Amino acid sequence: MPEGRGIFITATDTSCGKTFVGSLLARAFKERGLKVGVMKPVETGCPLKEGRAFPEDTFRLIEASGFSAPLELVNPYRFTEPLAPTVAARLNGVTIEPELIEDSFRWISRLTDMTIVEGAGGIAVPLCEGLTMGGLAKRLGLVLVVVTPQRLGCINHTVLTMEYARSLGLDVRGVVLNHIEDKADESTPYNQGELEGLGIKVIGELPHISGVERLPDEIYTIATFLL
Ligand SMILES: Nc1ncnc2c1ncn2[C@@H]1O[C@H](COP(=O)(O)OP(=O)(O)OP(=O)(O)O)[C@@H](O)[C@H]1O
Ligand SMILES: [Mg+2]
């Protein structure tokens, strides 16, 4: 395993399963004996705990990976407002510095075999002046994994995400079709085939899972593909 590999997890929208998929992947990689690093460069919508913003996604990723590093490196920016990073930063008088994120990422990836970086929201969300989430993935030199909810509308959202990724010259490894809801809709049996028919690689489908004590078989297939 070459040093400093990593993946950037984005999604077709917010609340599509980035943290969920990222955490399962971290566990699957760890089971394979890899030293897994994690990063959530900017987390917004953090609840207040003892008067401080508590980055829940970041802690979920840390717990899943077992990665131990100073919080400031894993999650350099956190805000309580459930808003895009640029807006939350502006409201707090903070300037998000991509150099700082990049330095943290390099530090983490030097210590690990595989670093999982979770974006905020979708790929075109602005991170700071002139840089989006996709732009950050490019800057960090990471391949992209797109989490797409398995539901009606996902074809349009996925194609738009892919087109934007392509416009940035990103290497998109593929899509994880995530059964975020406990029920199927009429599009469910068709979505994977339709996406593949449009030339989009579907790495795997992740079922809806209520308990995550045992990793679902599908995540091992996805992890193997990404290694
Ligand atoms: N396959 C699944 N089975 C069961 N629950 C899921 C699944 N995927 C996601 N969820 C649940 O859906 C919710 C949203 O998922 P998650 O927090 O991972 O999304 P996200 O894309 O990381 O959101 P954000 O944009 O806020 O970072 C969470 O409560 C998560 O536990
Ligand atoms: Mg998340």
Image (cartoon, rainbow, N blue to C red):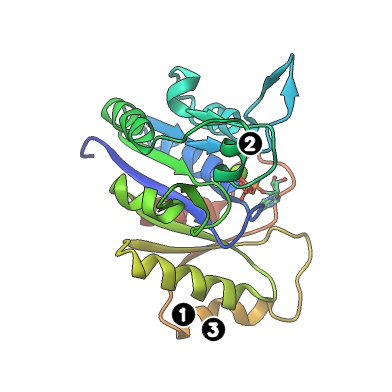
Q: Which residue is mark 2?
A: 91
Above or below: residue 63 compared with residue 220: above
Q: Quadrant of residue 203?
A: bottom left
Mark 2 or 1, closer to the camera:
2
Q: Which residue is mark 1?
A: 196
Q: Residue at x 52, y 44 (%)?
A: 22
Q: Residue at x 74, y 24 (%)?
A: 48
Three-letter amino acid code of the residue under disc 2: Leu
Three-letter amino acid code of the residue under disc 3: Glu
Q: Is 201 situated left or right of 102 in this image?
A: right
Q: Residue at x 61, y 35 (%)?
A: 57
Mark 1 C-beta to ligand 1 under 8 Å = no
- 46 vs 25, nearest the viewer: 46
**Residue 138 drawn at (x, y percent):** 32, 52
Q: Looking at the image, do the residues carrying marks 3 and 1 touch, with CB atoms under 8 Å apart?
A: yes
Element type at marker 2? helix
**Residue 145 drawn at (x, y percent):** 44, 57
Report whether residue 114 is seen: yes
- 19 vs 162, nearest the viewer: 162
Q: Which residue is mark 3?
A: 194
Mark 3 or 2, closer to the camera:
2
Q: CA distance from mark 3 to mark 1?
A: 5 Å
